Amino acid sequence: MAVKHQKTLALIFENPIRSDVNWDDIIALLRHIGAEISEGSGSRVRIALNGIRAVFHRPHPRKETDKGALKSMRRFLVEAGVKP
């Protein structure tokens, strides 16, 4: 895994939960580890990884993911078998 993706994964699992993780970096990490990503209606993004599916909302107008979404992303990654 590239250093940038390792850093993003570490930021997702950092405590306390951060509020400054860039959404595009998370998407790049997910694509790198083999997630299937498709756009839904509005700001919805459907993600499937290792048989686990989830729907997230792309942050707007900011590009950073909020704490609640990051906590959900952390739970999704753990369920899909991805840990730092």
Image: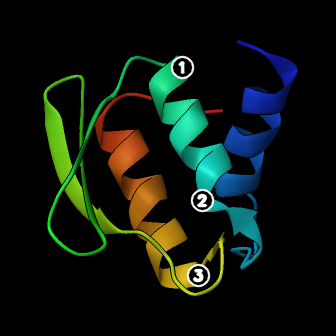
Q: Compute the Cα span from label 1 to label 2.
A: 14 Å
Q: Quadrant of residue 14?
A: bottom right
Q: Quadrant of residue 58?
A: bottom left
Residue 59 coordinates in the image, percent (x, y): 50, 77
- Locate the C terminus and report the quarter of the image it occupies: top right
Front residue (pair 46, 83): 46
Residue furthest top in the image: 1
- Neighbour tally class for label 3: few under 14, some 14-19, many 20 plus, Cα within 10 Å: some
Which is more toward the observer, 83 or 70?
70
Residue 73 on image: x %, y %? 44, 57
Closer to the camera: disc 3 or disc 2? 2
Q: What's the amino acid at mark 1?
A: His
- Compared with 51, 10 (above or below) is below
Q: Earlier in the sequence, mark 1 or mark 3?
A: 1
According to the image, label 1 marks what residue? 32
Residue at point 31%, 73% (across, down): 43
Residue located beneath label 2 in the image: 23
Q: For the residue labelled by badge 2, is the local secondary structure a helix, a strand or a loop?
A: helix
Instruction: Report the Cα–Cα distance between label 1 and label 3.
Output: 22 Å
Judged from the image, the secondary structure of the residue bearing numbered disc 3 is loop
Q: Are marks 3 and 2 in contact (CB under 8 Å)?
A: no
Give how far apart the Cα atoms at labels 3 and 2 are: 9 Å
- Element type at marker 1? helix
Upstream in sequence: badge 3 or badge 2: 2
Q: Which badge, 1 or 2, is on the more N-terminal residue?
A: 2
**Residue designated by label 3:** 66
Q: In the picture provided, is 76 more to the left or to the right than 21?
A: left
Residue shown at the point (34%, 27%) measured from the top left = 35
Q: Residue type at mark 3?
A: Asp
Quick one: label 2, few (<14), some, or many (20+) residues within 10 Å? Answer: some
Q: Residue at x 82, y 30 (%)?
A: 4
Q: Position of residue 8 (x, y in %)?
A: 73, 43
